[in-house]
Image (cartoon, rainbow, N blue to C red):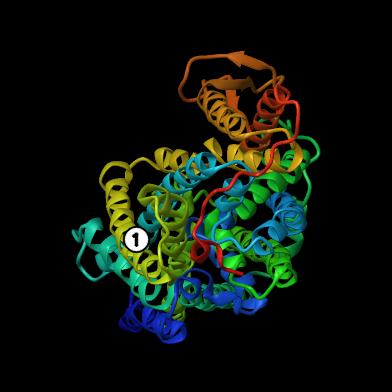
Amino acid sequence: MRVLDLLIIAIFLVGMPLLGVLIGGRQKSSDDYFVGESKIRWWVVCLSVVSAETSTLTVLSVPTVAYLAAPGAGGMTFLSLALGYVIGRIVVSYVLLPKYIAGDLVTAYAFLGKRFGSGIQSTASVTFLFTRLLADGLRLFATAIPIKVVLASLGLPDVNYWWIVAALGFAMVVYSYFGGVRAVVWVDAIQMLWYILGAAAVIIVLADRLPEGWLGRAADANKFQLFDFSSPILSNQYALITAVIGGAVLSMSSHGADQLIVQRLMATRDVKASQKALIGSGIVVFLQFALFLFIGVMLWAFYNGASPTQALGLNNNDELFASFIVNELPTGLSGFVLAGILAAALSSSLGALASSTVTDIYQKVVRRKLTDAEIFRQGRIWTVIWAVILVVVAGLFATFFRRGEPIVEQGLSIAGFTSGALLGAFLLGLIFRRARQLDAIVAFLTTVVVVAFVILGLKFTKATGEFLAVDFGKPTATSVSLAYPWYPVLGVVITLLVGGLLSLRHRAPTTPPDTEQPETAVKAA
């Protein structure tokens, strides 16, 4: 790396937190801290949602998907999944968002509290905290990897990952602590635009260096194929039915039952604005994936389809895009694009973790009405606490898992264990009027256990797709796992089936319980 590139990266890492503090201004209340007094424009929230769900691994890996697609497999089939994302967000916009925003709630799980009771609210919130902590710990660790590469280029190969993740965690906590959700949303939006501009710059550079006729060669190799009608739907995540249905339910769970996204949507002015932000984010994500897949096709033409590991000498396939950025882009532009990739991973979840902790758990533990000042103070305290925990988790991943890419990928799929159960609990409350809190809790826990068995132990034969009864562990040479988009679908079905059957025990529809939430805790929208 050259000095100018490093200077740009350093300015970014220091400037973004300071900009967040400036934008956030002085926080005056818990309402301002957690949901920005519901005054943030919908298009800013839209960009923030996209940034929040985009990680460094996404930016680096999506081009590799198109690059490695075998002839006839289709290089753009990943977009089928993104199409499902759009459909899922439309459903959430008209089914769940009105319940959150018109219901004056601080967290998504407060809806479960009002519908069933505080037990399922706390259960769902703890599940969110646990899965979000693991996912963001991996995300923070992944961000530290290119930074360590940069430091190694300066002759500092032995810088410990713990120091890197601590510095990144400090950068996130600064603007989250002082600026609240307003700072988080605006910084997310700016960072999203940054890495998109970087991707556009890469396309311009590549277009000037590719040989004539590369588009025709790519088309002949099916690199622009969008839909896969031939692959088995149970084991291939990009088969059309799997991608669209699984992607839609996955998006419903991640954007309707995950406080990381819901908190941002609650910061809009009203239901209509939140709907525009959510549906718009699906369209932006679709275009964003198309952009990075197109870069992957261009890289395929640039390197003549050479194997990243065998021919190009990279440690793993996902280093392909990063290697091009460092080695092929001109000075200055390389640093700008790399800073954009880092931006994709610095979207802060600390506010979502803090709001869920204070609203869904802390207030249940203290068993008394908290003043707005107390809620505000606890929000900031838990923002710092979760930052420390996040750094520790990221450091542990760096210590134990940095050499095992399959282990990292398995950890990234941890949300599959619970996403269906979370969404299923919300739908259970909406569909089955007789369902009560015990029904919801039993259905939730049953779903987590069954889905865990399916993910870890249930396999399919490659030849026929039939079920195999195998031991827990990695697939054998003759078997494959269930495609991950089916995990949330399976979870929702199990939750609704178990909860619906249990609700038949009750003769009359349940009356939503009094959750005894302090007024200041639910006054948001």
Residue at the top extreme, as displayed: 469
Q: Is residue 343 above or below residue 319?
A: below
Q: In this rendering, would 199 be left or right of 496?
A: left
Evaluate whether residue 83 shows in this view. Answer: yes
Residue 446 x, y percent position in the rendering: 56, 26
Q: How many numbered marks appear?
A: 1
* Residue drawn at (54%, 52%) of the image: 306
Work out whether residue 424 or residue 203 is closer to the camera in this orientation and state it: 424
Q: Nearer the viewer, residue 178 or 123?
A: 123
- Examine the image and state in which quarter residue 447 appears: top right
Along the line of sight, which residue is nearer the eye, 59 or 463? 59
Label 1 neighbour load within 10 Å: few <14, some 14-19, many 20+ = many
- At horizontal 56% and vertical 42% (from top left) the residue drawn is 117
The quarter of the rendered structure image containing the N terminus is bottom left
* Residue 221 visible within the image: no
Relative placement, left or right, of 118 versus 153 is right
The residue to which callout 1 is attached is 382
Q: Is residue 437 above or below residue 113?
A: above
Q: Residue furthest right?
A: 229
Point out residue 281 in the picture as x, y percentages from the top left corner. 67, 66
Q: Amino acid at mark 1?
A: Trp
Q: Quadrant of the C terminus?
A: bottom right
Say what secondary structure mark 1 lies in.
helix
Q: Residue 283 in the image: x percent, y percent?
A: 73, 65
Q: In terms of depth relative to the viewer, which is nearer, 171 or 82? A: 171
* Above or below, comparing residue 15 to residue 181 in the picture: below
- Residue 432: which quarter of the image? top right
Q: Residue 371 location in percent, x, y?
A: 41, 67
